[in-house]
Amino acid sequence: MLYYFLHSMLFVFWAFWFQPGGIDLGLGFAVMVIVPLTVNLLIKTNEQTPYILLLERFKPWLVLFSLAGLLSLSLENPIGATVFSVIWLIATIIVASFGFFRLSLQGFRDAEEVLLFVGCLYLAIGGGWFVLSALDAGRFLSYSQTIIDLTAIHFHYSAFVLPIMAGMFGRWLKQINVNMAGFSTMAAGLLAGPFLVAIGIEVGPPLEPVLVLIYIWFVIWFALAAIRYSLLLKGLIKFGLFVAMAILIATMVLSYLYSAGLAWAPQRLSIPDMVRYHGMANAFGFALLSIIVWLSVKPEQEVAEHKFPNHSIRGRAFIQDRLFTHLPLIPKNELIEDWGAYRHEQFNPTLVKPSIRSFHEKTSHYHLSANISWHRPFTFVLPLIIRVTKNMKQLYLPPGLVAMKGDTYKFSDEQTSVWVRKHADTHEPILTAYYSSWLAEKRYNFIQLPLPIGVMSAVLLPLNDEKDGLYLVGNNYDRFTGVYVSLWKWTWKTPLREVFHLIEDESGLKAVHTIYVFRKKMLTIHYQIHEANEHDYVR
C-alpha cells in the first residue's frame, strides 16, 4: 500500500503544482501511476516464473524513472526534457525486456500469455514516442506535435494496459475453468489494433474510420465478454470490472464518432474534446479500475512454471570430434534405459512393440539409412545451410540417401547419453546429440544439440500411435514441447516443430522425422533402421 500511496501522492503533487494540459496529464498519470501499478500486477501474478526477477529488482527503482518522466513533461527546455525522457525510455525497455524474454521462452501457444507479454513489448514503443514528444519532433517529422503526443499516450494505454488487462481476464477464465469461444481471435485483434490505428492515421480518410472500426469491434468484444463473466465475481470487484468495461465501451463509441466525423459527417468532436472525455475516462476510469480489479483477483498462470533445464553442454568443445579429447565418455548401448519412466495418460509404453522400444534401448546395435528431403521455400537457402552445418560438424543433413553409423556413450557423472552419428562411408560428422529426460508435468525426452555459441534443445513427448508404433512430438502438443535455443541465460522457443514416428512393418523398422517452421514443412527424413553386424558393436 505504501508503494501505491507514494506514486499517487507524487502524481497529485505534480498535477497541482505544474497544472499540465490534458495530454501531459494523461502521460504523467501513465508514467507515475499506471505503469508502476501494472508492473506490480505482473510481479504479483507471475511469482516464481522465469525472468520475473528482472521486474522484482527493477521495482524499487521505478519511482526514480517515473520522476524523470514527470520532469520531462514539466521542463520547457527541449534538451533537458529529452534527457529525462530517455531515462523513462530505459524504464519502458526494461519492462519490454521482461515481455520479450517470457514470450521467447513460452512461444505463442497461450493467447492470454501472449497478450500479457506483447503488451509489455508495446510499452517500449510508447517510450520511444515519449522521447519524440519531448524532442518536439513535430518540427522535423511529417506528423504534427499533437499526433506525436497522442501516439505516446496511445502506446502507454491502449497498446500496453488494454492487452495486459485482456490477458489477465483470459488467465482468470482458465482459472475458473471457463472456455471462451474465440478468445484467441479476440486477442489477435487487440494486439493488431494499435497498428491498425497507426495505419489509419497515416493514410487518413476514408480508410481510417474503417480500420478504427475494426479495432473498436475487438475492444467492445472484449468489454462485453468481461461484463458477461463479471457476474461470476463478487462484491466490489464485480462492480469495479463492470464499470471499467462500461467506460471502455463508451470511450470506444466516442473514438469512432470522432474518426467517422473526419471522413463522412460534420465533425462534432475535436481533439481537445477527445483528450478531455475519451482520454481522461480511459486513464482514470478504465485503466485504473481494471488494474485494481486484477490486483484483487490475482489471476496466475493455469499451470505452474517449471524451470527449463540449463545445462552446460554448449559450444564447439561438445561437438564431434573435440568432445572425445576432454569428456569422460563411457560406451553404452542405450539412449533410454526405461520407457516406463515416461508413462502418462496418453502414453503406455507396453503398447509399443518391443522391437520399436529396442531401438532406443539398444541404439548402438542399429545403423540407419536416411533419405533426406528438403522442401520449398527452404531449398533456396539450402546451399548456405549445408555449408554452415558441414563446417560446424553439427546438423549436417545434405539431401539424398545417406548411410549413417552411430555410437552411444554416457557421461560418468550425469544421466546423459551421447549419440554420435557419422556418415557410414566418409565418416563425416552428421550429428552430436545429448539425450536425457526432463520431469515437468510429465517426463519428456530432452535432447540437446550443442552449437558453436549455444545449444539447441528439443523437448519431445512420447505418445502411442493408432497401432503399436511410437510418436515423439516436439510440436505445440502442450506448453513445453518444442525446439529451443539457449544463449547464455536466455532461452528462446523457436518456431521449429518436429515429429518423429517410429513403426515396424514387413520390411523392418522405419521412422519418419518431419521438421516444420511454424506449420510449413521444412525437412523430412525417412529412415530405414537395421541391426548392425556383430563386429560393428566394437568401437
Image (tube, rainbow, N blue to C red):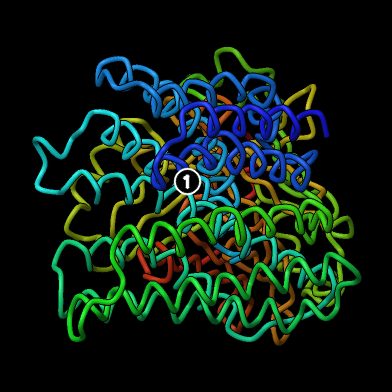
Rendered location of residue 299, percent (x, y): 79, 58
Rendered location of residue 443, percent (x, y): 81, 54
Q: Is residue 406 above or below residue 479?
A: above
Q: In front here: 106 or 536?
A: 106
Question: Visible in this render: residue 312?
Answer: yes
Q: Which residue is mark 1?
A: 26
Rendered location of residue 514, percent (x, y): 46, 67
Question: In the image, 172: left or right of 388?
Answer: right
Residue shown at 27% from the left, 60% from the top = 198
Residue shown at 18% from the left, 48% from the top = 383
Q: Is residue 393 above or below residue 192?
A: above
Mark 1 surroundings within 10 Å by alpha-carbon count, few (fewer than 14), some (14 through 19), many (20 or more)? many
What element does badge 1 sit on? helix
Rendered location of residue 89, percent (x, y): 41, 29
Which part of the image, by quadrant, shows the C terminus? top right
Instruction: Tell me the quarter of the picture where residue 516 sits.
Output: bottom left
